[in-house]
Image (cartoon, rainbow, N blue to C red):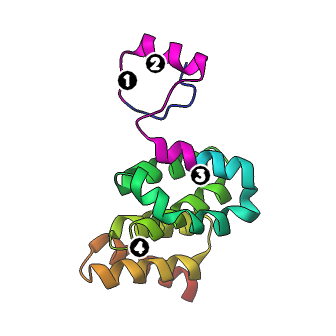
Amino acid sequence: MEVKRITEEPLSSLEADILDILKGNYKPNYYGVSSVDELLKEAGLEKFDKKSRKLISELKGTIKNRYELNTYAKVLFYSDRKKQGLAVFELNTLLFPDEVGTYLSLANSLGVLRYHSEAIIQYEKALEIDPENEEALRSRDYIKSKISN
């Protein structure tokens, strides 16, 4: 029973956490992910981008590293909520603009959806940070070869 939890360690114990969840007293380790999830549900995809941009300073205080939202975005993306996943990947690039991995995750997901031009733009952003990143170079060149054929 993983209600309101994404792969995380218990705060107290699994049993105590479940009791707190059922009582409505639970604050997860990944509170930022819960906040983004609630915003996505409340605002809907159309308004998510604008509202999430306004919350960036607040989210920076609750999201510890790029992996939190990256994991959540992958869960969304691979559970047939691809557009929501892309929106969260994009938010992650705004929260962690100096992290190559945020752009790679967004670019890879765009590539899966065959949004080739958009994927190339994200690979280029990753390469601005790390010009020798092999994954970004290889993936960008692969997509460019698919477009030219």
Looking at the image, do the residues carrying marks 4 and 1 touch, with CB atoms under 8 Å apart? no
| 34 to 63, vertically: above or below | above
Q: CA distance from mark 4 to mark 2?
A: 42 Å
Disc 3 to disc 1: CB gap under 8 Å: no
The crowding category of the residue bearing disc 2, from other C-alpha atoms within 10 Å (few below 14, some 14 to 19, many at least 20), is some
Residue carrying label 4: 139
**Distance between the alpha carbons at the discs numbered 4 and 1:** 37 Å
Instruction: Please state which amino acid type lies under the numbered disc 4.
Output: Ser
Give the distance between the C-alpha atoms of the residues marked 1 and 2, in whole angstroms: 7 Å
CB-based contact (under 8 Å), mark 1 and mark 2: yes
Is tag 4's residue or tag 2's residue first in the polypeptide sequence?
2
Q: Which structural element holds mark 1? A: loop
> At numbered mark 2, what does the secondary structure look like: helix, strand or loop?
helix
**Residue type for callout 1:** Pro
* Mark-to-mark CA distance, 3 and 1: 25 Å
Return the mark for residue 10.
1
**What's the magenta region?**
9-36
Q: Residue at x 26, y 79 (%)?
A: 130
Instruction: Name the residue that disc number 2 marks.
Output: 17
Q: Residue furthest bottom?
A: 148
Look at the image and tell me whether residue 104 can be seen: yes
The answer to whether the residue labelled 4 contacts the one labelled 2, judged by CB atoms less than 8 Å apart, is no
